[in-house]
Image: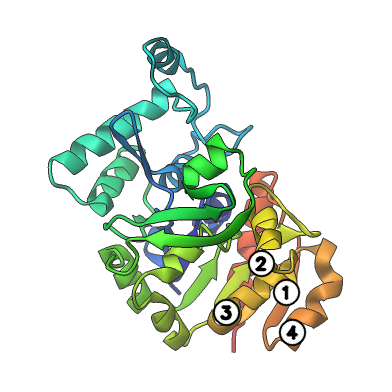
Amino acid sequence: MHVLAIAGGVGGAKLALGLSRHLAPDALTIVVNTGDDETFHGLHVSPDLDTVMYTLAGVANPETGWGLAGESFRTLGALERLGADTWFRLGDLDLATHIRRTEMLQHGLTLSQATRALASAQGIRHPIVPMSDDRVRTIAVTEQGDLAFQEYFVHRRSEPCITGVRFDGVATARRSPGFHAALAASTAIVYCPSNPLVSIGPVLALRGVRDAIKAFTGPKIAVSPIVGGQAIRGPAAKMMGELGEEVSCLGVARRYLDICHAMVIDTVDGMQAGAVEALGMRASVTNTIMNTDRDKEALARHIVGLIEAWN
C-alpha cells in the first residue's frame, strides 16, 4: 500500500499526522497546497507546508494548530515599531524557518528541495512535498476586488463576499517531482479534510492532475471538512455558501464527484449517507472531528481500513 494524501493546512495536517502513525514513510506521501504561499518582509512563507511540517514534527502550537508551541513575537513588535506592516503574525521561532527556506531558494534550490531539507532537519521521515515548485497564487475574487488569499483570509478575516476563486500561474505550473512520482506509485488517494475550494482546489487545478486522478484506478477517498453544515475551521462554509453551493458534506461530495470513490462523513451527518451514495459515491460514517491525537489516529485507522478492504 502507498497512500497519496492531498492536504491543506490545519485539518490536512491533523489527518496527515494520523496517517503517519499507521503508515511507514515509504507508504505515505503528503502533497501540500502552496497556492497561499506569500512573501512577507522579503521572506518566502509557505503556511500550509509549515503547518503540516510542524504538526508531524510535534512542535505545532496545540491551541491554534498552526505556528509553533512556545512562540514569541519580539521581532514582529520591532518590525511594527520600524513601520512595517505586521498583520500576518510571524513568530520569532517561525521566522527561522522562513529565513532558511528563503536562503535555500535564493541559492537555487527548488521548493521541493528546501522543504525536504527543512523536514529532515526536524526529524520528519514521511515525505512532505509541495504541489508544485512553480508559483501558483490563489486569488479570492470578491465584491471588494481581487485579493491574494492571505490578504482575504488573515488581513480581511474572510469578511468580503466572494464571487469566485482563481489560481494565477496554474496554467503553466507543473506538479512537483514528488507529486508526479506519488501519483504514479500510489495505490490509494486520500483528500484530507481541507477547504475544497482553496486548499484542495489549487492542487487539482494543476495541469494534468485532475485527468491523472480520474484515470487512477485505486480507491480515492475524501474526508468532508464540513460537519453539521459548518466548517471545523476556516472559511470553507462561508465561501461555499457565497458561491451558491450547498454547505454540507453532500455539497463537498458534489465537488469531488468525478475524482472520488468514497466520502467519509461525520456521525453528525450520518443521515446524509444515503444522499451521498445516491450520487454514485460510497459513504462511510465515523467521527471526523480530530481534537486529540487519538482522534487523528482513529480517523486514519478508519481510512486505512477502507483502503485495505477495497474491492
Q: Distance between the residues labelled 4 and 3?
A: 12 Å
Residue annotated with mark 2? 302
Return the disc, 1 or 3, that comes first in the chain's sequence: 3
Kind of residue at disc 1? Ser
Q: How far apart are marks 2 and 3 (CA)?
A: 17 Å
The answer to which quarter of the image holds residue 194 is bottom right
Q: Using the image as rendered, state which of residue 51 and residue 78 is in the foreground.
A: 78
Label pair 4/1, CB-CB below 8 angstroms = no
Return the disc, 1 or 2, that comes first in the chain's sequence: 1
For residue 260, the mark is 3
Label pair 1/2, CB-CB below 8 angstroms = yes
Kind of residue at disc 4? Glu
Looking at the image, which residue is at 44% across and 27% down? 90
Q: In this view, does 199 lie above or below 291?
A: below
Residue annotated with mark 1? 284
Looking at the image, which residue is at 23% across and 51% down? 113
Label pair 4/3, CB-CB below 8 angstroms = no
Front position among marks 2 and 3: 3
Kind of residue at disc 3? Cys
For residue 277, the mark is 4
Kind of residue at disc 2? His
Return the disc, 4 or 2, that comes first in the chain's sequence: 4
Front position among marks 1 and 2: 1
